[in-house]
Amino acid sequence: MDEKAKALILVALIAIVSFIGTYFFSASGMTLEKFLTPNFIPLLGSILTLNFVAFLFCSAIVIALILFLGRKFNFYYALGLSATGLMAGSCIGVFVFNLFDFFLAVLFANVGIFWALLVLEPKEKELKYAQIIRSGSFAAEKIILFASIGLFFGVMIATVSNQAFYEKKFTDDLLAMTIGNEKTMKDAIQEPLITGIADAQKQTIDALRLAPQFTVLKSKNDADVLIFVATIDALSGQFGSESYKDTLRDQISKSPATSSFSETLLKSIPLMATSAKAAWIIYAIQAIIMALFIGGIIVKNGAGIVYNLFALVFPTSFSSGSASEKTKA
């Protein structure tokens, strides 16, 4: 088999495994919205799935294939083939599985390919032991870094384009993680107030009905007096009913003073207000940290191991000279 045929097979493998990786990524339930909250639980729920582990495994294989291309072929030739395979498989997956929010990460990963292939050979020559696996992990780290930067900008663009919404969401999510969400807070404050108002009014009416003067009125034959007595009796039952409490809840909820506890807290706690306004950068930073952490532990080392296996099973070495002088296919 000639070298061009081998190169096309490697490109096809990169595209296929990239596409499979996007399938597993989508199946894990991962969305950009899960990065746009201070609550890590939904994000961890997607990360701790077999589908996401399969995605990480596919990512490691793709990077290993890219590095193997860089080991076997001319630098620019390998760069073009790698970028073509990655973009083809990933872009099809992005369209098929509606992963447009992560497209920037794919684009930036291609920039990382350039850096990874550039440092691969010099790093292997620099190392004294386990050169192939360690240089592979070192080069893989560059692709992971740029993909993470792409995710960083993707999250930043998503939040900046709808900043007011995510500022409020930041506060609501933060409250839900600590003292409860807005509904819980309202219930905790309003329910005792509503019960107290209803009970106080009922006790007032009941005290009036038990007064001697009111008892005397019941014996009167005057129509107006009897209507008054009947009205007081009816109010006694009404103030103790749930329907009356519902009316009080409705009136209190419409009051401007209780319209939004999150807005009230933003005004009363300056640090929370400042943090909410910086949500766009906080979310972006936590996204890149998460990506670098997971990529650095699993994908980076996995890619180095798989790249080492490729080099052992299909022995090949870098051509002499600079990257641009490697043997062309």
Image: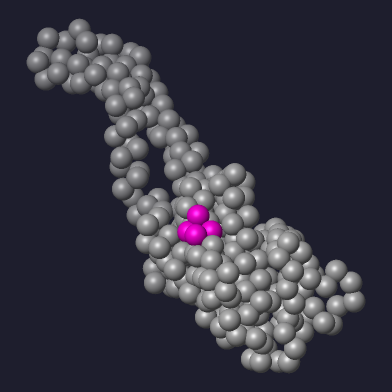
Q: Quadrant of residue 101?
A: bottom left
Of the pair 34 and 29, the residue shown nearer to us: 29
* Residue 243 in view, yes or no: yes
Q: How is the image coloured?
A: one colour
Q: How many marks?
A: 0
- Is residue 107 positioned above or below 36 on the image? below
- Residue 33: x and y, percent? 47, 57
Residue 29: within the magenta?
Answer: no
- Is residue 182 positioned above or below 268 on the image? above
Q: Which residues are magenta?
A: 16-20
Q: Farthest residue in the top direction? A: 219
Q: Is residue 243 left or right of residue 135?
A: left
Instruction: Name which residue lies at 45% across and 73% down.
Output: 157
Of the 4 image quadrants, the one containing the N terminus is bottom right
Of the pair 17 and 172, the residue shown nearer to us: 17
User: What's the magenta bit mostly, secondary-structure-wise?
Assistant: helix
Of the pair 10 and 47, the residue shown nearer to us: 10
- Residue 145: x and y, percent? 64, 73
Residue 19: within the magenta?
Answer: yes
Q: Is residue 168 left or right of residue 128?
A: left
Instruction: Name which residue lies at 35% across and 45% down.
Output: 253
Q: Quadrant of residue 119?
A: bottom right
Instruction: Name which residue lies at 59% across and 64% down.
Output: 62
- Residue 268: x and y, percent? 53, 62
* Residue 304 in view, yes or no: no
Of the 4 image quadrants, the one containing the C terminus is bottom right
